[in-house]
């Protein structure tokens, strides 16, 4: 909850924008907001009983996915608060705490689970709206322990809501995604592998794009951008062809 003092502090910090101030990550925020609407639409199409069914993620029902997406918004709001106040607040106290919270959240009554998603998303949106322009480059730490400027929260959220909408397994499809978002998701997977030093020998041949050669090149895997991203993010292979006739086993995304 905000106190009047918080509000006053924020107004005082906001000030006029000039060329030197790091402004909000506008494009990523649009992706995040559109993705939130997309996830909400897919969730609304499911009956309460259908929430009990499995998601695309091993061991997780749709309920787990919804709880996770809700708590993710809350965790990112903590990073926004950290950036705004300078008081360090991690996304989650520990990985165990995060997992236990998801398990517990998944048992909530359906209406509570739906409002968890809606309220946490709205709260995060308000945090984005209210962050003074001067704070967007403030450093915060991700759940993986990386220090990043808080502007990254927009992208972190965008990929969560879009990809987990697919995980609901209720008709969401990467073919619905904006193509610039798909391109960024593909780049994100490759960045994650590089950061972890994963050994991948593969040529990513997306129709209409320059092939991307990883490691020694390995088999050339071709397909459309949505099908490629679906596979690279670990959401199943569909519509892809491999020069060796076999798709290699990929490391996880994150
Ligand atoms: Zn997630």
Image: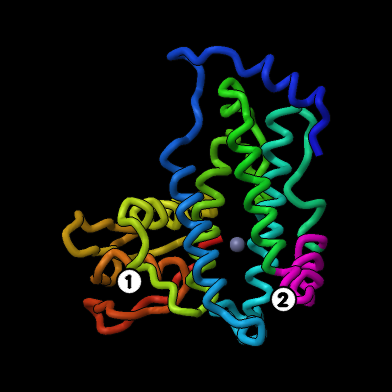
Question: Residue drawn at (31%, 83%), measured in percent from left and top?
Answer: 246
Which residues make up the magenta segment?
97-113
Q: Which residue is situated farthest in the left direction here?
A: 208
Q: Looking at mark 2, is its residue's CB closer than 8 Å to ligand 1?
A: no
The residue under label 2 is 110
The residue under label 1 is 227
Identify the element where label 1 is drawn. helix
* Horizontal relation, residue 251 to residue 241: left or right: right
Q: In the image, is residue 66 part of the stretch drawn in magenta?
A: no
Counting the numbered discs, the total is 2
Q: In the image, is residue 107 part of the stretch drawn in magenta?
A: yes
Q: Chief secondary structure of the magenta span?
A: helix
The first of marks 1 and 2 along the sequence is 2
Identify the element where label 2 is drawn. helix
Can the viewer see residue 252 in this picture?
A: no
The residue lying toward the viewer, choosing from 69 and 99, is 69
Q: Residues within 10 Å of mark 1 (few under 14, many from 20)?
A: many
Q: Quadrant of ligand 1?
A: bottom right
| Image position, residue 40 (x, y; %) | 54, 64
| Image position, residue 234 (x, y; %) | 47, 72
| Image position, residue 94 (x, y; %) | 80, 55
| Image position, residue 252 (x, y; %) | 52, 67
* Horizontal relation, residue 57 to residue 214: left or right: right
Question: Residue drawn at (60%, 82%), measured in percent from left and top?
Answer: 47
Can the viewer see residue 183 in this picture?
A: yes
Q: Is residue 234 above or below residue 154?
A: below
Q: Quadrant of the N terminus?
A: top right
Q: Quadrant of the C terminus?
A: bottom right
Q: Quadrant of residue 106?
A: bottom right
Could you tell me how far apart the alpha carbons at marks 1 and 2 are, in whole angstroms? Answer: 32 Å
Q: Residues within 10 Å of mark 2 (few under 14, many from 20)?
A: some
């Amino acid at each position: 909850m905000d106190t009047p003092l918080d509000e006053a502090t924020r107004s005082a910090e906001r000030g006029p924008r000039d060329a030197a101030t790091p402004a909000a990550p506008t494009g990523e925020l649009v992706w995040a907001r559109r993705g939130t609407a997309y996830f909400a639409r897919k969730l609304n199409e499911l009956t309460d009983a259908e929430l009990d069914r499995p998601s695309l993620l091993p061991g997780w029902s749709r309920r787990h996915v919804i709880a996770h997406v809700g708590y993710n918004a809350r965790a990112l709001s903590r990073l926004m608060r950290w950036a705004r106040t300078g008081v360090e607040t991690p996304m989650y106290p520990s990985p165990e705490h995060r997992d236990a919270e998801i398990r517990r959240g998944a048992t909530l009554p359906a209406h509570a689970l739906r409002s968890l998603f809606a309220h946490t998303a709205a709260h995060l949106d308000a945090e984005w709206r209210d962050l003074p322009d001067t704070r967007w480059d403030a450093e915060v730490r991700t759940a993986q322990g990386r220090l990043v400027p808080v502007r990254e929260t927009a992208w972190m959220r965008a990929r969560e809501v879009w990809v987990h909408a697919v995980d609901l397994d209720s008709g969401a499809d990467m073919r619905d995604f904006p193509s610039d978002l798909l391109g960024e998701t593909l780049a994100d997977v490759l960045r994650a592998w590089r950061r972890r030093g994963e050994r991948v020998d593969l040529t990513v041949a997306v129709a209409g794009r320059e092939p991307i050669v990883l490691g020694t090149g390995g088999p050339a895997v071709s397909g459309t951008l949505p099908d490629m991203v679906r596979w690279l993010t670990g959401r199943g292979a569909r519509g892809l062809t491999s020069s060796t006739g076999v798709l290699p086993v990929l490391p996880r995304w994150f």
